[in-house]
Structures are given as C-alpha cells and as structure tokens.
Image (cartoon, rainbow, N blue to C red):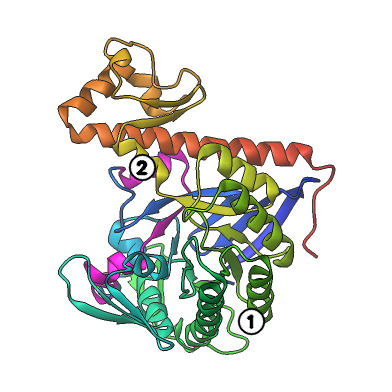
C-alpha cells in the first residue's frame, strides 16, 4: 500500500500519536514538515535535515514545474533521486502559488491561466495537469488541485471558490487514480531505477503515491462542513485543511480547525497546511492535527529571527554584539552546541550566506523538537493504545 496510518495513542483532548507508513519512510506523527520549495529547504543541506530528524519534507509543484520542469525531473528518476532525498516527501498542488499571483491569473471552470513570475510566460493549470506534474515528480503524497479562498472573502466569493474546489477535487482524484502508476520510480537496493510502467486498477496494491483532498470554504463554518463531507465521500487517502493563515485572526483559525477535524475520518491522516508559530503548531497537534508545514522557520531565520525556549530573538540586535551564550541555552542542536549569539549577529551584519544556514538549522531543530515533545506527551497522556480496527 502507498499509505498506511496507525494511531498508537490518543489524548482526551483529541491529540493523536501515530505512524504514517509511506514508501520512503515511516513518519512519526504529529509531524512538522520543512518546506523545500524548489527542491531545497532553503540554505539547509539534505544530510543536515536527516541529522535534525526530518522524516518528510515538501516540494512545490508550481516552482518545480517552471524550473527545471517536471519532465526533466521525471527523466532524472523523480524528485527523490533528483534532490538526493531518500526519506518521505509531499508535493503541493500549485494551487496556493497560483492563488498568490492575483494580478497574473484568470480562473475559469476548466482551470487557471497564469503568467510565470520568472519571465511572464503564459501557462494553464487544470486539475489534470497538476496531477500529471505531481505524478512525474513522484512524491509519496500528492495534493488535489484547489482554489484557495482569500481573507476576507464575502459569502458569494467563498461559495464560488468552494464550487470550484469540489469540482476540481473530483477531477484530480479521477485523473490521479487513472494515471498515477503509468510511471513509477521506486528505490532499489542496487540504485534508483525506473520500474516497468503499470496500469492502475482494482486489486493492484503496489501504488507508490497517495492523494489528499483539501477542505476549503473560507471562514464560513457551513461551507467548511460541506467541503469536508463531500471530500470524505470521495474517499481520498488523507485530508488537508487549506485556506488558513492567510490573514484571518488566530481565534478564527482555531474555530475553523475545531469545526473541521471531527468531520474527517479518524483512521486517516489530517494535514493542516501552511502553519504556523511554535506555540500554534503545538496547540494544533494537541487538537488532533497529524501533519503541518510552514516556511516560517527558514524564512524568519534568513531575516535574523530565532525561535528559542526563552522566546523570539532578533539576532541582529546590538545587545548580542558580545553575547557569548548559545542562541538557545536549552537547545542541543548543532548550532547551539557550537556557536554564540555574537557570532550569529556578526554573520547577519556581514551578509554572510552562512548566517541563513545556521539560523535555519536552529529554527528547524526547534520546530522538530516541539513535535518530538508533543508525541512523547501524547503517548504518556493516553490511558491505553488505540486500535484502528
């Protein structure tokens, strides 16, 4: 099977300690997934990610489609081989990136016409094309093509966005099931080579990719409920909650998550897209979210913002000019074991590339450590193991 999800323990508040078995890795959940937009978690080498304990990372369909191109990556053996990442991987659908090109796109029932942010060239993404690109990339988990609703959005806009998302979800699923195994790239002990193409069909349990549906509906609870219920009827391999952290108040984010989670199948993974700050990811995990991702750890790092057990610090501050303490005295990551705040500040002010690398490594270690502690806590809080059967 391409995906198997087992819940090992659960808390009274709804948090789940589980294992997500994927072709390239068994991932411990709840999990935070570093974002590798263009085939790289910015400034952090793959071997360092492995040392930090990252079990699954993201690739971005939109960016990889534009450069170097999904067909190029397919010919190179798929994204895992191309970027030398042997562990699990998820690709987004490209929907959010196209959504962010508000001045360069035109949405129709068929799909989205947009202009590349690189050179202005015109492109057309449909649910079917998004699936073809993601199948070529070959990540363990692919995402249905959706239409992200901005905030604020009035009722009519949210309803229209939901209509498109539901229609595109059906088309994504149908196309994915029909074509996902036309080209399969699986690692073998003697190297990564393409396998013989196979045709999808009932009884064929050798798939290497899974597809998640994405719940949309803006901030309207009834639309979110409708979206979740209709996606569950389609029977995706897992379910994501999208369209949050796009400017809405945090309380509204929490309300939306609390509304949607009980509607999703308990025996399938739940993925909250594009969140958040350290305290937020811990809170969401304790509510029952199994998977989260966000660019914040690395993006903030490149601007000198470090997340620590003592709160956020801006390492560019003058007060750190002669500070010989580690970035976080309670962190045991490779950066905190070796470097001082004074040195990290010096790197920032000198414009050294190493600055973004070291800051990013620490922030990612901090996020991953939070999830590790949450998993241990959920296991301890559970009165007895939970069976999926």
Q: Can residue 118 be seen here?
A: yes
In the rendered image, the vertical position of residue 330 relative to residue 191, given as above or below: above
In-image side of 184 versus 162 (left or right): left
> 82 or 135, which is in the foreground?
135
Q: Which residue is mark 1?
A: 234
Region rendered in magenta: 44-73
In-image side of 312 versus 206 (left or right): left
Mark 1: few, some, or many residues within 10 Å (few <14, many ≥20)?
some
At a point 73% along the width and 63% down the height, the residue shown is 266
Q: Is residue 46 magenta?
A: yes
Q: How many marks?
A: 2
Q: Quadrant of the N terminus?
A: bottom right
Q: Which residue is mark 2?
A: 298
In the rendered image, the vertical position of residue 233 relative to residue 61, given as above or below: below
Q: Quadrant of residue 108?
A: bottom left
- Tag 2, which secondary structure? helix
Residue 82 coordinates in the image, percent (x, y): 28, 62
Q: Quadrant of the C terminus?
A: bottom right
Q: Which mark is residue 95?
A: none
Q: Can residue 195 be seen here?
A: no
Residue 185 coordinates in the image, percent (x, y): 39, 72
At a point 37% along the width and 36% down the height, the residue shown is 361
Q: Is residue 98 magenta?
A: no
> 47 or 259, which is in the foreground?
259
Residue 212 coordinates in the image, percent (x, y): 55, 70
Measure the alpha-carbon separation of dots 2 and 1.
35 Å
Q: Quadrant of residue 80?
A: bottom left
At a point 55% along the width and 82% down the height, the residue shown is 163
Whether the residues at callouts 2 and 1 have beta carbons within 8 Å, the answer is no
């Amino acid at each position: 099977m391409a995906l198997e999800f087992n819940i090992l323990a659960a808390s009274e508040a709804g948090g789940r300690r589980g294992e997500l078995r994927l072709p390239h890795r068994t991932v411990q959940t709840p999990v935070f997934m570093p974002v590798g937009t263009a085939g790289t978690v910015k400034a952090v080498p793959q071997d360092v990610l492995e040392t930090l304990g990252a079990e699954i990372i993201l690739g971005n369909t939109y960016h990889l489609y534009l450069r170097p191109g999904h067909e190029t990556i397919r010919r190179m053996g798929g994204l895992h081989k191309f970027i030398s990442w042997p562990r699990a991987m998820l690709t987004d659908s490209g929907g959010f990136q196209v959504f962010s090109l508000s001045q360069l796109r035109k949405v129709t029932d068929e799909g989205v016409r947009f202009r590349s942010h690189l050179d202005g060239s015109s492109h057309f993404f449909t649910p079917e094309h998004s699936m073809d690109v993601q199948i070529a990339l070959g990540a363990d988990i692919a995402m249905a093509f959706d239409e992200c609703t901005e905030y604020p959005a009035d009722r009519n806009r949210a309803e229209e966005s939901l209509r498109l998302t539901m229609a595109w979800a059906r088309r994504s699923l149908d196309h994915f099931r029909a074509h996902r195994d036309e080209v399969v790239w699986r690692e073998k002990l003697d190297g990564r080579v393409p396998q013989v193409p196979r045709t999808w069909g009932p009884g064929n349990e050798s798939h290497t990719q899974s597809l998640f549906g994405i719940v949309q509906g803006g901030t309207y609870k009834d639309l979110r409920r409708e979206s979740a219920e209709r996606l569950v009827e389609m029977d995706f391999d897992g379910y994501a909650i999208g369209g949050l952290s796009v400017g809405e108040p945090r309380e509204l984010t929490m309300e939306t998550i609390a509304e949607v989670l009980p509607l999703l199948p308990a025996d399938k993974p739940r993925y909250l897209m594009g969140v958040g700050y350290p305290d937020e990811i811990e809170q969401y995990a304790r509510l029952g979210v199994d998977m989260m991702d966000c660019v914040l750890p690395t993006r903030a790092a490149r601007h000198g913002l470090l997340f620590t057990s003592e709160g956020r610090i801006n390492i560019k501050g003058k007060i750190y000019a002669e500070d010989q303490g580690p970035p976080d005295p309670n962190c045991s990551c490779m950066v905190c074991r070796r470097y001082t705040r004074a040195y990290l500040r010096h790197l920032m002010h000198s414009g050294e590339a190493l600055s973004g690398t070291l800051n990013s490594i620490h922030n990612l270690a901090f996020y991953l450590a939070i999830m590790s502690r949450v998993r241990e806590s959920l296991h301890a809080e559970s009165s007895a193991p939970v069976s999926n059967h």
